[in-house]
Every structure is written in C-alpha cells, then in structure tokens.
Image (tube, helix red, strand yellow):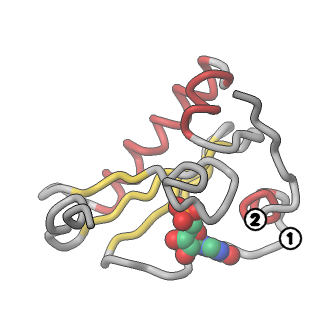
Amino acid sequence: MQFDYDDQNIFAKILRGEIPNQTVFENDHALAFRDINEQAPVHVLVIPKGPYVSLDHFARDATAAEQIAFFDAVAEVCRIEQVDTGFRAIANARADGVQEVPHFHLHILGGRNMGRMLEPAT
Ligand code: 5GP
C-alpha cells in the first residue's frame, strides 16, 4: 500500500496555524482539538503532527516516539475530558471507512452513552 499525503488537507492547515482550532492538549508529536461538528458532548480529534494519511499508515511508518506521544495525547484527552464512565474511539480510513480528512485522526467521543457501535448491515 502506498500512502500519498496531501499537505493541503484541513488538518495540515490547522497544524501550520493557518486555521484556528480549540486545542485540548498538545505535545511534541500530537495535537488534540475539538471537532467542529460535535457528535457528542465530548468530541475531540487526536492527530499526529507528522504526515500520516490513516491509522494503518501511522501504525506502519510512524516512529516509536511519535506513536508513544500520540497515545500519551489520547490518555491526556481522556483525563482532561473526564470520560470516566466510558467513551468511543473511532478511526475512519479511506473510502470504505468514509474518511473525510486525509490526515490520520482518532475521534474520542463521550459524555453520553454512545449506543451500539454500528447500524445493522443493509
Ligand atoms: P472523518 O470523517 O475524516 O473521520 O472526520 C473528519 C472530522 O473532521 C469530522 O468529524 C469533521 O467535523 C471534522 N472537521 C472538518 N473540518 C474541520 C475543521 O476545520 N476544524 C475542526 N475542528 N474539525 C473539522
């Protein structure tokens, strides 16, 4: 699989400071910010600062330091947002995953019961 990163995607622009965001947490290799179209009382996106298109790209090619920092950011978001009763983490990838923004991001959703994971297949 070849991953071609488009540096004009909206999250690349957020990382360059060209578009504002509501930052929840940041470290050397990751940024967490509120989704502009919140689907739950807590809806935070965690993204690596490096140019990774999708979860499988990040898992394959990110350095150990980038992967550790990313999951440190996930832990910090869960702590800051106090999702003690639970949450859902979603990573959409490519066309079948209905990924809108081609920069890897993990949705952290919570603050209410999130219901069943998927609609029944049609
Ligand atoms: P995807 O479908 O790619 O998994 O999710 C992309 C998410 O990015 C969507 O939930 C959408 O609301 C969010 N989003 C799109 N543009 C922006 C933006 O400019 N700022 C923020 N904070 N979120 C955005």
Q: Quadrant of residue 108?
A: bottom left
User: Which residue bears the numbered disc 1?
Assistant: 18
On residue 14, the disc is 2
Determine if the C-beta at disc 2 is less than 8 A from ligand 1. Answer: yes
Between 70 and 62, the one lying in front of the other is: 62
Other residues around mark 1 within 10 Å, as few (<14) / some (14–19) / many (≥20): few
User: Of the residues shown, which amino acid type is indicated by label 2?
Assistant: Ile
- The residue sitting at 53% across, 61% down in the picture is 98
Separation of marks 2 and 1 at Cα, in angstroms: 6 Å
Q: Secondary structure at mark 2?
A: helix
Is 7 located above or below residue 50 in the figure?
below
- The residue sitting at 71% across, 44% down in the picture is 49
- The residue sitting at 44% across, 58% down in the picture is 107
Q: Is residue 33 visible?
A: no
Where is residue 40 shown, x and y percent of the image? 32, 77
Left/right placement of residue 5 relative to residue 112 reads right
Is 40 located above or below residue 76 in the figure?
below
Count the marks: how many? 2
User: Of the residues shown, which amino acid type is indicated by label 1?
Assistant: Glu
Q: Is residue 111 visible?
A: yes
Is 38 located above or below residue 10 in the figure?
below
Q: Quadrant of residue 65?
A: top right
Q: Residue furthest top?
A: 64
Q: Quadrant of ligand 1?
A: bottom right
Between 27 and 37, the one lying in front of the other is: 37
Where is residue 122 shown, x and y percent of the image? 27, 67
Q: Are marks 2 and 1 in contact (CB under 8 Å)?
A: yes
Q: Secondary structure at mark 1?
A: loop
